[in-house]
Amino acid sequence: MPDLHAPEGADLLQVLWCPFDHSIMPKTAVFWRSAATVTDTLTTPPEPPAMQFDGYLPEPCLVNPEQVTEYPDHLECSKELQGQLGNWSVWQAADTGVDSSYASYPQNFYDSELAGAPGWKVGGWPRWGATDPTPRICPACGSDMDALLTIATFEGDDDSTWLPHEEPADEPPTGFDHFEPRRPTAVQIGSGYDQQLYVCPAAPEHPHSELMH
């Protein structure tokens, strides 16, 4: 878990969720553990005896983590930096090679191509769209909370070049009931949103919080 604040002695994070709607999204439970204490592992994950939506039951799949560099949404930047991001002459002077179609709205390029990588991710910057950025405050101590995990409906956007690295064949593993390259887990949050979990950096054992956006 690189770049994450974990309780002392913990090197494993387990996230469970209920496959029913709880205030418009599944309810999650977070457990910090030590990998050394896990001696018996299940070869086949158990399925819930009941669930509200098919989109709340992930398809089993392999995880191939990629580390990327991303930046905060322009609305989380200072007013001075927002002004620079919205100034087309600044982008031209930087010789970034930005397509001239962004000349009227250079901030769109920043948000689409540089800020908040889409898809499932650990840590990183939140993506905002359905709502403007909102404070993420620890309910126990009032500290600003950090992004912990993003549970995403889609791995990429049609209007963005953010795309996960795929195997050359790009074919579903044996046993998949459904498979879409942009939704390999078959999870759907709301009408196609992200569910973001936040953790307290001062005390990770404090209750986590979550937002859908």
Image (cartoon, rainbow, N blue to C red):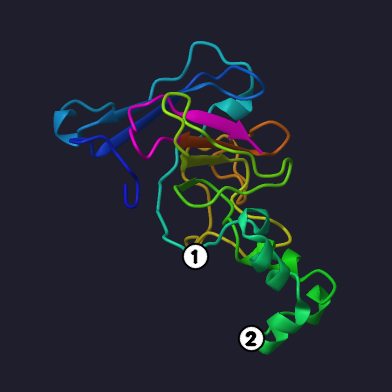
Taken as a whole, is the magenta stretch helix, strand or loop?
A: loop
**SS assignment at label 1:** loop
Q: Residue type at mark 1?
A: Pro
> Is residue 182 visible in the rendered structure shown here?
yes
x and y percent of residue 19 in the render? 55, 20
x and y percent of residue 32 in the render? 29, 30
| Closer to viewer: mark 2 or mark 1 | 2
**SS assignment at label 2:** loop
x and y percent of residue 36 in the render? 14, 34
Image quadrant where one finds the C terminus: top right
Task: Please tell me which residue is depicted at 35% across the width and 30% down the height of the picture.
Answer: 14
Task: Please tell me which residue is depicted at 64% across the width and 21% down the height of the picture.
Answer: 53
Instruction: Please tell me whether residue 98 is drawn above or below residue 207 in the rendered image.
Output: below
Within-10-Å neighbours for mark 2: few <14, some 14–19, many 20+: few
Q: Residue under circle 1?
A: 168
Q: Is residue 139 left or right of residue 77?
A: left
Based on the picture, tell me whether residue 202 belongs to the magenta stretch: yes
Is label 2 in contact with label 1 (beta carbons under 8 Å)? no
Q: Residue under circle 2?
A: 94
The span picked out in magenta is 199-213
> Is residue 43 visible in the rendered structure shown here?
no
x and y percent of residue 95 in the render? 65, 88
Instruction: Please tell me whether residue 146 is drawn above or below residue 95 in the rendered image.
Output: above
Q: Image quarter for residue 13?
A: top left
Task: Please tell me which residue is depicted at 73% across the width and 34% down the height of the picture.
Answer: 191
